[in-house]
Amino acid sequence: MTLKRNIIANYIGQLYVTLIGILLVPMYVKYMGAEAYGLVGFYAMLQALFMLLDMGLTPTMARETARFNGGAIDALSLRRLLRTLEGIFIGVAVLGAAVMIAAADSIASQWLKVEQLPQVEVRHAIMLMAVIVAIRWIDGLYRGAINGFERLVWLSGFNIAISTVRFVLVIPFFIFVGTSATLFFTYQAVIAVIELIWLIAQTYHLLPKVKERHIPWQWQPLRGVLKFSLSIAFTSAVWVLVTQTDKLILSNLLMLSDYAYFTLAVLVASVILIISGPVSGALLPRMTKMNAEGDEAGLIRLYRNATQMVAVIAIPAALVLAFFAEQVLWAWTGNADIAHKAAPVLTLYALGNGIMSLAAFPYYLQFAKGDLKLHLIGNALFVAIFIPLLIWATGKYGMVGAGYAWIIANLLPFIVWLPFVHRRFVKGLHTQWMLRDVISIMVLPVITLYILLQLIVWPKTQLLVTMYIVVVSFGLFMVAAISSSWVRDTIRQKWRVSVAR
C-alpha cells in the first residue's frame, strides 16, 4: 500500500466522519430536543476525558506494530504486547464504566442541570454512556494495531461505514422507533459492540501466526515501551485537558439546554482546525526529512509557505464564523433561538481557534528539529493560564466567559511565547514570519470584512442567507489568497510555464 494512498484515504475518512457528525446535528436537535442533545454533548466530553487513561498505549501499539513490519521485533513479541495491552485496556474499561454507572444517579441529580427530562431517563442515559465510552476506548487499541500494519485504506472505509450507521441511520431510527435519550444511547451502544467485534476480527486477521496456542498475560512486554508511552501521554493529556476542561465545568454550571447551545457553537468553531489540519499532517514528515538532510533554507521556506497556506484558509474561516456567527448558525440549524443563544460563543471560539491554527506552527518546527522541550514547557504554561482563567470566567460569565478565556489563553502564548521559540531555533525568523506570513494576509480580509459589515443587508430566507455566507466566504478567501506572496509566486510560476509551452 503506497504512502500516498494511505494519506489520501486517511484524509477522506477523517473529513467524512467529522463533517457528517457536524452537518446532521440540527436533525438531532430537531428530533431529540435541545436538552436531550445536551446529553449527547456531555457524552462526547466524557469520551474525550476517558482518553486521559490511555497513557500513550494506543500510539505505542501502532509504533510496535510498525516496528514488526520493519523487522525490529518478532511475531511472538508483538502478540505478547497485544495480550498485555488487552488486559490493561479491558481492566481500565470495566473499572471506568463501573465508576460512571455507580455515579450515574449523582451526575443526573446533582451535576447536570436538568429542567424537563425525567431523572430516570437521564440516569439510564448516563449508564449507557458509560458502557459506550468504555467499549469505544478499547477500540483504540485495535485501531492502533491496524494503523501500524498500514491498512489505512481499510480503516478509512470502515470508519466511513460505521460513522454512516452511527450518525445517518439514526435518523430513520428516530422516525420509526423513538427519539428519547435512552433509545438514542441504546442504539449507539449496539453500534459500539458491532464496531469493537469487527476491529478485533480485523486485527487478529492481520496478526502474524505463532506456534504458541496460549499466550499468558504478563507485565514484561510493557517494560521496553513504557518510556515512549509516557512521553506521548503527557502531550495527549495536556491536549485533552485544554480542549475538554471548559466543557466539563460548563456541564455543571449551565442548564442542560444551554449546554447544548454551547456544544453546538464549539462544534462549528472546530471547522477552522479541521480545514487547516491536513496541511500539518503532510508538513511534519517533510520538514523532518529536510532537517535530517541539513536543508535549513528549504525547511524555513517550507515552514513559511505552509504558514501562508494555513493563514489563507483559517483567517477567512475565522472571520466569517466570528462576525457572521448568528447568520451561520441560523443557515445551519434553521432555528433562530439556537442561533441567537449560541452566536456569542461561536464568535469567541472561532477567533480562538483561528489563533490556535497559526500558533501551532512553532511546534512543527520543534518536531522537525527533534527538540520538544520548549513545547512541553509551553503546554504546561498554557494549562497554568487557561485552567484558572477558565474556572473564574465561567463561574462569573458562564459560557461567554469560557469563550473569552479561550481567546486570552491562545492569544497570550501567540504574542509572548512564539517569539521566544522562533528565536531559540532560527534567529531573525519571527519578525518576518509575523509580518509577511501572518499579518500581511490578515490586513486586507479584515478591511474587506469591515466594509461588508456596513453594506450587507441579510435576507429573510434560509437559502439566501446560506448563499450570502458562501459568497462572502469565497470573497474573503480570494482576498486572503491575493494577499499571500506564496500564492502570488505560485500563480506567477504556473503562468510562465503555461506561456512557455
Image (cartoon, rainbow, N blue to C red):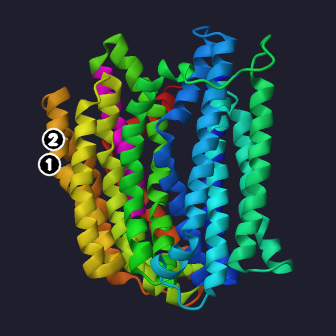
In the rendered structure, the answer to whether residue 327 lies left or right of residue 301 reads: right
| Residue occupying the point 42% across, 42% down | 236
Name the quadrant containing residue 221. top right
Q: Are marks 2 and 1 in contact (CB under 8 Å)?
A: yes
In the displayed structure image, the side of residue 428 where residue 139 appears, left or right: right
Prevailing secondary structure of the magenta residues:
helix
Q: Is residue 413 above or below residue 454?
A: above
Element type at mark 1 = helix
Number of marks in picture = 2
Q: Position of residue 249 (x, y in %)?
A: 38, 70
- Please tell me which residue lies in front, 299 or 391: 391
Q: Which mark is residue 416?
A: 1
* Relative depth, front residue between 19 and 479: 19
**Amino acid under label 2?**
Pro
- The location of residue 311, given as percent across then percent down, is 35, 50
- Which of the numbered marks, if any, corresponds to residue 43? none
Question: Does the magenta-highlighted stretch encompass residue 319?
Answer: yes
Q: Is residue 329 magenta?
A: no
**Quadrant occupied by the C terminus:** top right
Q: Classify residue 412 by image quadrant.
A: bottom left
Q: Residue at x 49, y 33 (%)?
A: 282
Which amino acid is tagged 1? Val
Q: Is residue 319 visible?
A: no
Q: List the residue tagged with mark 2.
A: 419
- Residue 430 versus residue 418: which sits nearer the camera? 418
Q: Which residues are magenta?
A: 297-320
Q: CA distance from mark 2 to mark 1?
A: 6 Å
Would you call the spot at circle 1 few (<14 residues within 10 Å), some (14-19), or many (20 or more)?
few
Horizontal placement of 489 versus 381: left or right? Answer: right
Give x and y (percent) for residue 278.
50, 42
At a point 44% along the width and 53% down the height, the residue shown is 273
- Badge 2 marks a residue whose secondary structure is helix
